[in-house]
Image: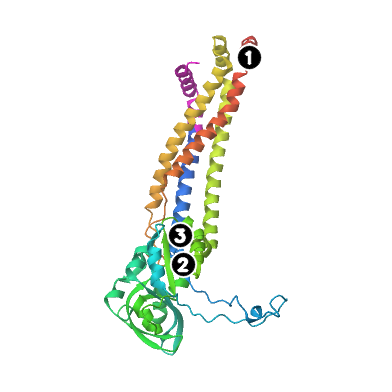
Amino acid sequence: MNAKLIIDIAINLIRARLKQSIIAAVGVTFGIAMFVTLLGFMNGLNNLLDGLMLNRTPHVRLYNEVKPSTDQPVLISKEYKNNTNFIQSIKPKDRGREIYNSKAIINILKQDKRVIDVAPKVTAPVFFNTGSIEITGVVNGIDVPAEEHLFKVSDYIIEGNVFDLNNESNTIIIGKGLAEQMLVKVGDVVKITTIKGGLVSLKIVGIIQIGIAEIDNTMSYTSLRTAQMILGESASYITDIQVKLTDVMMSPETAKEYRAKFGIDAIDAQTANSQFETGSNVRSIISYAVGITLLIVAGFGIYNILNMMIYEKMDSIAILKATGFSGNDVKWIFISLSLIIGIVGGLFGLLFGFGLSSIIDNIPFETSSLPTIKTYPIDYKYTYYVIGFTFAVCTTTIAGLFPALKASKIDPVEIIRGK
């Protein structure tokens, strides 16, 4: 089998039926372009939503959960511990929300090679006072440099600077929804009532907007020391330790390990955002399904064109066989023909897909709820292009295989006798 001769014959067959060949290639081009564009846009949207929620979530969060004591008095009793006991009104154990030995735990975590960084936090439920009305909210006391390193808080601040929390004492950054409810701006002073009844005045140095109304209507940030002062606690008081790992996929096992090692509660990012990740996975599956369907439809088009070409080229196939070409040679001629259509259509599809993605990526997308987003999100991951091109070549090869097998079985004697 002379490969060069077979490819030359396949190219000549394409030229002979140029219009049909172009239509087949256009079908592949359209399928690939839509596949790449759809996946890029849908995964860009997923990445945007991940940035809003998952990137704001630590990979592992260490905390003390309020829960009933596992050691109930009746279980200590020798007389009743082996009996069936019906217990009502179980009270939570009064151990508080503070993480004891937090500094030692943080030092151990920072030495773990799997950990990028650790950010301590103090979470305090409070009431924001506006006139005679009290608005429920949460004050997050943060270590500003660590929080900025892990979660890029500054990306969501629409007014002010996050580092002003460290530069000035008794300052706060509040959510945009909360600011609109209280009709306050940067430079104003807000009064906060703690759950213990304390009253604190804090100066607003910034306004933040995550883009999720439920968070923006309740959230606020202050420095770690200010949050401890609001609660009347010492400088060692920490309620949360946020951990970011080098690989988020390790978080379930790592959380389990830390829970056993430090004797405190731990939750991983997958568990905390399980419903959110499910939505992202479903959108990705839909994108792949639609894109693959487009390529399969294009494959059927190639199959029909090659099938018709065989019927129209019966004489040529008979002459090829009569001049010494074997059935295998004829089969490879038509497979080569379909491969050429698939490769050319696939390459143009990648080019048009990238161009279409670039156009979408530059379309303005401005909304007040997402101030950090300026254009429609597109993900240019190279794997989409590799998958699209590979599937295009495989689809066209399979589409051309069946007509090629049919062509290889044609008896030249019957064709010539019929003529």
Residue 27, x across and y down, in percent: 51, 36
Mark 2 or mark 1: which comes first in sequence? 2
Q: Residues within 10 Å of mark 1 (few under 14, many from 20)?
A: some
Q: CA distance from mark 2 to mark 1?
A: 73 Å
Q: Please name which of the two marks, 3 or 1, marks the residue nearer to the observer.
A: 3
Q: Amino acid at mark 3?
A: Asp
Q: Please name which of the two marks, 2 or 3, marks the residue nearer to the observer.
A: 2
Query: Which residues, given as a range, are shown in magenta?
Result: 1-24
Q: CA distance from mark 3 to mark 1?
A: 61 Å
Pointer 2: what residue? Answer: 61
Q: Residue at x 37, y 81 (%)?
A: 234
Task: Inspect this view and state whether residue 223 appears.
Answer: no
Residue 50: numbered disc: 3
Q: Main secondary structure of the magenta part?
A: helix
Residue 384, x across and y down, in percent: 46, 44
Q: Amino acid at mark 2?
A: Arg
